[in-house]
Amino acid sequence: MKQHAETRVAVIGAGIAGLTAAYELKNAGFTVVVYEKTGVPGGRMATRFKNGFQFNPGATFLSEDYHQLKSYAAEFGVALTPMISGSRHRVIRSGKTYRYGARGPLGVFRLNVISLPARLRLVKWLLKSLFRSGPGNFFDLSTIRPTLDFEPAGSYLRREMGDEVVDYLIDPLTAALHFYRSAAMSTAVVFGMLTMMKTKGNFTARHPRGGMSAIPKALASKLTVRYRAKIEGVSSIKNECRIRIGGKDEHFSAVVLACPAPAALT
């Protein structure tokens, strides 16, 4: 149901989470103001250009299963192009580039970016995982047993596979797909990804034309975003929320914190 236009909501953070929340709230009839501490939208969903090359410092492609982002791309006219064949991807180790990409456990033996013992260890783990049921849905982590939430994926994977596999295979993948290295993810996410890849059989992805920042820029263009906004505090009195900025209070009905937990704590 549409809300009254004077119901004001503040969203702190213009990353993809904040922009999505703000856009949906605006479509529901709320008056929304987004506050962003930097000068550009997107957060980790960013694109940089230098010397004719395009760099995505966060994720570099979108899984075909990210239906919400795909629908935004279609709505805003952002073209999605297929991911380059895995045979063209490379990982750098000690100043040398190595082929990245394998189809199935046996394809791991061609990944000479890691040593043969590391490849054997990885193949053993993958074969073992293929014959056990997947623990839940990547897009609904509540379906995965809670105990897997309490250990960082990096710790688990280093124990199971060793440092080489994590440093030169796992972290390049998680950084390219999910913005973070494995140390910043839960083990539940890793098992959810594994289940998705097993179910799909052929994991596919696409790039937004114009870089990963194309979608957040399109979202931001539809919203009121205040850039370089330093929030000094957030408080709640009765049914009103207040944001302290520039030594003055701004009043809202609600505040959405769409920023990393350390930033929210400060």
Image (cartoon, rainbow, N blue to C red):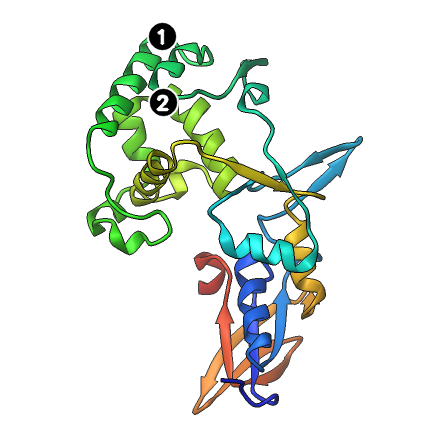
Residues at badges 2 and 1 in contact (C-beta under 8 Å)? no
Compare marks 2 and 1 and give the one earlier in the sequence.
1
- Disc 1 residue type (three-letter): Leu
For mark 1, give the secondary structure. Answer: helix
Residue 93 left/right relative to 47: left
Name above or below for residue 26 compared with residue 121.
Answer: below
The percent position of residue 160, horizontal first and vertical second, equals: 26, 26
Percent position of residue 198, x then y: 33, 34
Give how far across and how far down residue 13 sits, in percent. 57, 63
Q: Residue furthest right?
A: 51
Look at the image and tell me whether residue 134 can be seen.
yes
Q: Which residue is mark 1?
A: 116
Q: Residues within 10 Å of mark 2 (few under 14, many from 20)?
A: some
Q: Quadrant of residue 140?
A: bottom left
Q: Residue at x 26, y 47 (%)?
A: 136
Looking at the rendered structure, the kind of residue marked 2 is: Asp
* Residue occupying the point 60% across, 76% down: 26
Residue 27 sits in quarter = bottom right
Foreground tag (2 vs 1): 1
**Residue drawn at the location 37% of the way across and 21% of the way down:** 104
Which label is found at residue 163? 2
Closer to the camera, 119 or 103?
A: 103
> With 207 as the anchor, is 204 left or right in this view?
left
